[in-house]
Structure formats: structure tokens, C-alpha cells
Image (cartoon, grey):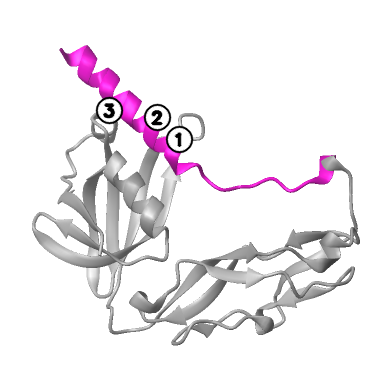
Amino acid sequence: MSTLTATKREATEKLNVLREEGKVPAVYYGAGKESTSITINEIDFIRLYRTEGETGVFKLDVDGTSIDAMVYDYQLHPVSHKVLHVDFRVVDTNKPIEVAVPVTLTGEAPAVKANLGTVTHVTQELTVEALPNDIPHDIEVSVETLEDLNSQITAADITLPKGVTLIDEPETIIAVVAALRGDDDAETSGEIDMDAIEASAEKGQNEEAGDAE
């Protein structure tokens, strides 16, 4: 299990100074824990997030005390993409929780092979309930059953892992074959490039170290 080291943050610490030092203000709460302000290393967080995403359970080590946690939310600077703040959700690994899990489409649809249309990914994530350690990193959905124009896959068609229960409506559309459109209408990915963000963070810290010499 991954571990992320953190220290408790005092109210007197200035956030802009912390960020200049490559640190990120954060907070953890949940599972009976009071909301607590902490500080984490930006690069360490980026590496953890690439592995765990928002569905993986890891150990949050706060001044030597270990807590089971998940990434609940994070904020990025709109221009520099530096990590500005992180919310961690404390979990009890013996109690089920609800969480949104990303949906990944796999395979090639026969309708696409036949040039009948293109697959539109309608629902990007599904809300499920499971014990924290049973939550899948993502839900893979094969599109190989999509044979005709307007054929679709719904949440009811998905076989979830053992111990994972669907919370969203079974009629939720995951993917559908839509008519072919021009290149201008092609989908664009909204995924965050964590590799680029990590490289930017490392560059910034190296520049600060050089200025300090």
C-alpha cells in the first residue's frame, strides 16, 4: 500500500510561502476524524495520484500517525497547473463507502468497423458502493457488443467486481453508437497530464534551489 507523508499545518503558516517551497496545503476529514489542516510535498502527491487516483486507499502518515485515506478532491492553478490544495477522505476499511469510479472503454465496436458510426462515451464515471479496498481503479467496459447505429451500453449491462454495488440508475447510458460527424466534432480528452505537472513541479523546485545558492 502506498504511503504519503504529511505534517500538521499551523494557522500562522503562510500558504504562498509553503507553495514556493514545493509544499501543498491540504486537509483530511471523515470516518470520525476532525477536519485537520496538513502540508504535503507536491511531487510526492503527484506520484501518489498517478498510482491511486481518487479510488485507491493509501496510508497518510501525519507526523508519525498512520491513517487510511483516499484523494477526495484537488485544485490546480489554471495557468501553471501547480497543485494548490488537496482534500483527503479518511476511510474505515471495514465499512463500505460510495465513490465515483472512472469508466474506461475497451475494444473496437463492430459498428465502427463497418463504418456505420462512431462510439460516443456518454458517462465518464459511475457511483458504486464497496469496502474501500474493494473499489476498482476503473471500470472497463467492452464496446464489442455495439453492432448497429444507435446501439448502446447501459450500466445494467456491466458486470461489476465482487463486492461492488451499483448506485447509479441501471438505465444510465455508458456508450452509444452515433452517426459519423466531421473532424471538428471529434471528442477531446479532459484528462489531466500528471507527468507534465510533475515535470513542471520538479523544474520549479530546482530553479528555487539554484536561486538560493
Residue 14 in the magenta stretch? The answer is no
Q: CA distance from mark 2 to mark 3?
A: 13 Å
Whole-Å distance between the Cαs marked 2 and 1? 6 Å
Residue positioned 38% across, 40% down in the render? 83
Looking at the picture, how far across and down is residue 107, in whole percent?
68, 64
Q: Which residues are magenta?
A: 184-213
Question: Which one is nearer the viewer's eye here, 32 or 20?
Answer: 20
Packing grade of label 3 (10 A; few <14, some 14-19, many >=20) is: few
Q: Nearer the viewer, residue 123 or 151?
A: 151
Do the numbered discs 1 and 3 sit on residues whose CB atoms are within 8 Å? no
Task: Please tell me whether the stretch drawn in magenta is mainly helix, strand or loop.
Answer: helix
Identify the element where label 2 is drawn: helix
2 and 1 marks in contact (CB < 8 Å): yes
Query: Can you tell which mark lies on residue 196?
Result: 1
Identify the mark at residue 200; answer none if there is no mark.
2
Q: Residue at x 68, y 82 (%)?
A: 157
